[in-house]
Image: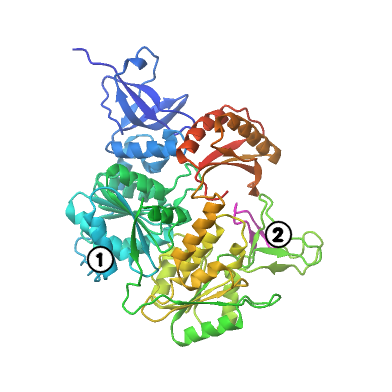
Amino acid sequence: MAKLDQFAQVLVDVPGLAPLDYRIPEDMLAAPGDLVVVTVGARRMTGVIASITAASDVEGRRLKSILKVMKTTAPLPAEWLALTRFAASYYVRGWGEAALPALPAALRRPPTPQQEKRIAGIREAAPKARGDASRAAPPELNDEQRAAVEAVCAAPGFATWLLFGVTGSGKTEVYLHLMERTLAADPEAQVLLLVPEINLTPQLVGRVEARFPDLAVAALNSEFTDRERAAAWLSVHEGRARILVGTRMAVFASFSKLRLILVDEEHDLSYKSGDGLRYSARDLAVWRASKLGIPVVLGSATPSLESWMKAKEGAYRLLTLSARAVEHATLPDVELTDPPPKGSRGMISEVSRAALEACLAEERQALVFLNRRGYSPVLSCPACEWVSTCVRCSAFTVYHKREKALICHHCGWRRPVPEACPSCGNVDILPRGTGTERIEEELEVLFPGRRILRIDRDSAAKKHAAEAAFGKVHRGEVDILVGTQMVAKGHDFQKIGLVLVLNPDAQILSPSTRARERLFATLMQVAGRAGRGGERGRVLIQTRFPDDPLFSALARQSYPAFADATLEERRESACPPFMHQALLTAEADQLSSAIGFLEDAARAAAPLAGDDVLVYDPVPMPLVRLMNRERAQLLVESVGRMTLHRFLIAWNQAISGLRTSGNIVWCLEVDPLET
């Protein structure tokens, strides 16, 4: 009997391309999920087989053949293909644009004898069980922790659990017990633990390895080399690693038998990708768990309003940890105080200085939090009002005193600090505003001889620098820690007695819809670093708006009060999560070209939107110029998610057909965090 011709649909990473049909040569063995080499136009590319068919609708067409099947890895499972297909559909991208970038770069390189040897070497470098290490004795769970573990384990199949626990309540210990129960129930089961920040990964990996010394624990984040990522990815794909701890990219890892997903700090903005496929790892984790029929646990002391609303509506199951896990540890006292008078040279008031002195006298550590790095946000000339600005962006350049440079935090452009005003020649140019570097300098003057350490993206720019810095804090080699958002969450500092928060007022005054939600979460998180070791902690916040309701809820450390009030405000103003949004952005050489393109897109949207989708006028983006490109945006929204999605699919096709000029680059983002 003659063998039927076989054809494959292949995914390639080319914008706008649907899966492409290729002939499978008679002497080639291929399966869905295989990595293959194909030609697209004149280029050789790596692709993924999405499906294989002998369908007659492709017979008779002049199709190219697959050139080679890359046998360096086992085929990607159907579950992984379904995940990437959903991600592409929901975020309105080509399937290949979601699938191929999700694979480690080292595995997508063209197959050669050298590449095959390289993959063999990568396998050897994969994480392994420590074997002879003694297992860390797990601490006893309190009643609330035990109830949370039992509730998740007793509910078969899929459910989304929102683990709402105050800072220091032992959410990580709940995760570890859930892992233990899941892995013990099935010798092939695997667990995914997502974390928001790179600097949290080593800390959690260490705890997981200590608890499971006989299992291979893999880690994935963007700080790893291509080789390290490929080694971790392969170990999970092939079932050798039972646990994966990673940042948002880990949600696309290929598992052989995934049985539990945990998302720590589920509210964190880092779970939303800011380029390429603009996906939310948290949301994809929930979808993936639903299709696998497994539990997913979202943990946070300050859940996102979206998750909180779903818990109130019953779509998510709420688990509460209302007390700190360490015996005798209580939530810190939160106090408000005035900042120094305007015109003062320093940022630290007399009340705050006295609090720092008292904390240090007790031989405890203090944390000074300011969410702005650098020495000062801008240099200015008092004579002619010149200010330091980026030549490529519509933004100030930040003064970094120790580097003697002005640096743009948006594009990275830098220049030496001028000796005189470039505009009028005045030599008396001055810093305006305060960053962490300036606070560090002020503290060195106020507390000579004390060990002061600054942790931000400047001081921890080198690989493993953050891990080393946090190690000093944990070992008690630091008296005063100065930091930004990097120090605010996830770190179990046992010796911090005081948290001093400087200048939260800038965010209080922000017009952004989500600004207050983010500020409250940040302040709750950073406040939670105090008093975790059993002794009472104190939080001191310098603000000029002590009567703001946000601070009232914060003083009571009542997230439910803040969240419920904010949700009601959002409902009344028809803002997310009661409204679903998408944002079309365009960049061009000239702002007029970007605006013109968006106006054409708006006209194309009009007949598709009907009465159910609201299309706003194009406007310049808040940061209008970035890297010498002018940017604008157009917001669309609808009460119904499915209504908006149907519109976006049709609109995306219409936009793709628009004629462009002025070197236009556009992007359609679903569920934007910034509008």
Query: In this figure, which residue is indicated by the disc labeled 1?
Result: 146
Q: Nearer the viewer, residue 280 or 371?
A: 280
Say how the picture is coloured: rainbow
Q: Viewed as shown, does residue 353 lie left or right of 131?
A: right
Amino acid on which disc 2 is placed? Ser
Crowd band around label 1 with a 10 angstrom C-alpha radius: few (<14), some (14–19), many (20+): some
Quadrant of image for the N terminus = top left
Q: Nearer the viewer, residue 202 or 319?
A: 319
Q: Is residue 451 above or below residue 263?
A: below
Instruction: Indicate the secondary structure of the residue bearing disc 2.
Output: loop
Residue at (40% x, 48% y) in the render? 283
Instruction: Indicate the secondary structure of the residue bearing disc 1.
Output: helix
Query: In this figure, which residue is indicated by the disc labeled 2?
Result: 388
Q: Is residue 70 above or below residue 363?
A: above
Q: Is residue 163 above or below residue 27?
A: below
Whether residue 463 appears in magenta in the rendering, the answer is: no
The label on residue 467 is none
Q: Position of residue 502 (x, y in %)?
A: 57, 72
Residue 531: quadrant of the picture: bottom left
Residue at (49% x, 48% y) in the render? 578
Q: Position of residue 419 (x, y in %)?
A: 74, 65
Q: Position of residue 486 (x, y in %)?
A: 48, 64
Q: Viewed as shown, does residue 53 lie left or right of 606?
A: left
CA distance for labels 1 and 2: 56 Å
Whether residue 411 appears in magenta in the rendering, the answer is: yes
Residue at (55% x, 39% y) in the render? 667
Kindly tell me whether residue 223 is visible in this rendering: no
The stretch of residues the image draws in magenta is: 405-417
